């Protein structure tokens, strides 16, 4: 029997409201009168988050020549929008730390998600996209719908996993058969309810089928390609046993030369461990 995706997301929202610090930061940067001191005060409300922000600012992800030792300096150098994405990413990961380990290995899950996020960020930088951190956020959250299924419908999750093995089929396809929808749709619905930017929502919602996106295809295509690269290189595990099917239209939409994949993978190997360090501690 098919489940109701909207009802599942509504149930999740009762216990998983978007973290207060992330919400306050997001709202603050929309106000032109907000100062760096205001933003520093918000981040400093969460000491663990403040420490992560400084770690990120001093990591290979940004590769600044001198040490950044204050939140204020990090805000100035990284920028409001990019820092907002970082705050959001760290806050959401912390929310799902209690997912039952008997259903999925959460460290491997986040390692996969972090690798997709890092690859997406590198691909976006290769295209000279503005605010490449939003692609990192979309990559980090692309499989968040799986966590919702594991939490709200664990028996269905186990059935999906078993059928994937038996049929040798991709998870999102089996999910549609068993649940009536896939994790991409579920994740997109949650992020929309959280009022995240439309670009992030659509990137998550359409990452398995970017060519049918009703809006900009670039975001979903970047996450789609990043997901394929990450699965092929076996960074972590989201419970998926097979490499997703390559969407040629998605690759063409990025207007990137195939030769860029070598340097992308090289950068991924450099940046991945740094990203794991600050996301997972």
Image (cartoon, helix red, strand yellow):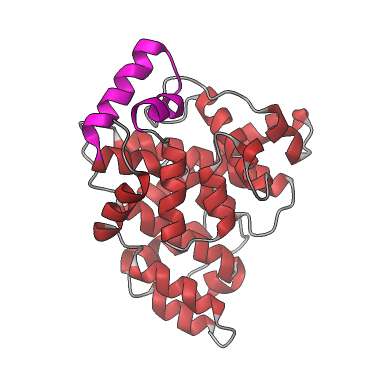
Q: Is the magenta stretch mostly helix, strand or loop?
A: helix
| Residue 252 pos. (x, y %) | 76, 34
Query: From this viewpoint, is residue 67 visible?
Result: no
Image height of 211 relative to 15, above or below? above
Whether residue 269 appears in magenta in the rendering, the answer is no
| Residue in front for this viewpoint, 124 or 151 | 151
Q: Quadrant of the N terminus?
A: top left
| Residue 144 pos. (x, y %) | 40, 44
| Residue 236 pos. (x, y %) | 41, 31
Give the total of numbered labels. 0
Query: From this viewpoint, is residue 213 visible?
Result: yes
| Residue 203 pos. (x, y %) | 56, 46
| Residue in front for this viewpoint, 117 or 183 | 183
Q: 53 left or right of 62?
A: left
| Residue in front for this viewpoint, 215 or 117 | 215
Q: 218 left or right of 76?
A: right
Q: Which residue is drawn at 30% across and 58% down?
A: 13
Whether residue 167 appears in magenta in the rendering, the answer is yes
Residue, far bottom: 33
Q: Give the range drawn in magenta.
A: 153-179
Q: Which residue is drawn at 34% across and 65% down?
A: 19
Residue, far front: 1
Image height of 53 relative to 276, above or below? below
Q: 249 left or right of 41?
A: right
Image height of 35 relative to 18, above or below? below
């Amino acid at each position: 029997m098919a489940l109701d995706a909207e009802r599942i997301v509504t149930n999740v929202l009762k216990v998983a409201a978007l973290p207060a610090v992330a919400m306050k930061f997001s709202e603050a940067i929309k106000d032109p009168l907000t100062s760096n001191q205001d933003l520093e005060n918000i981040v400093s409300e969460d000491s663990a988050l403040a420490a992560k922000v400084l770690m990120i600012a001093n990591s290979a992800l940004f590769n600044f020549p001198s040490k950044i030792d204050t939140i204020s300096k990090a805000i100035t150098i990284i920028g409001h929008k990019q820092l907002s994405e970082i705050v959001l990413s760290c806050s959401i990961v912390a929310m799902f730390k209690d997912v039952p380990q008997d259903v999925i290995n959460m460290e491997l899950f986040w390692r996969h998600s972090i690798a997709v996020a890092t690859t997406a960020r590198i691909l976006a930088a290769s295209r000279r996209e503005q605010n490449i951190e939003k692609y990192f956020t979309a990559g980090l959250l692309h499989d968040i719908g799986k966590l919702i299924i594991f939490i709200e419908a664990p028996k269905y999750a186990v059935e999906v996993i078993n059928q994937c093995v038996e049929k040798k089929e991709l998870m999102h396809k089996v999910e549609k058969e068993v649940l009536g929808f896939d994790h991409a749709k579920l994740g997109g619905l949650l992020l929309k309810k959280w009022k995240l930017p439309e670009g992030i929502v659509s990137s998550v919602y359409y990452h398995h089928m970017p060519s049918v996106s009703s809006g900009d295809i670039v975001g979903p295509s970047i996450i789609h390609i990043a997901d394929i690269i990450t699965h092929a290189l076996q960074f972590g595990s989201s419970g998926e046993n097979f490499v997703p099917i390559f969407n040629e239209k998605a690759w063409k939409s990025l207007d990137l030369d195939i030769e860029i994949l070598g340097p992308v993978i090289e950068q991924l190997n450099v940046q991945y461990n740094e990203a794991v360090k600050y996301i997972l501690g």
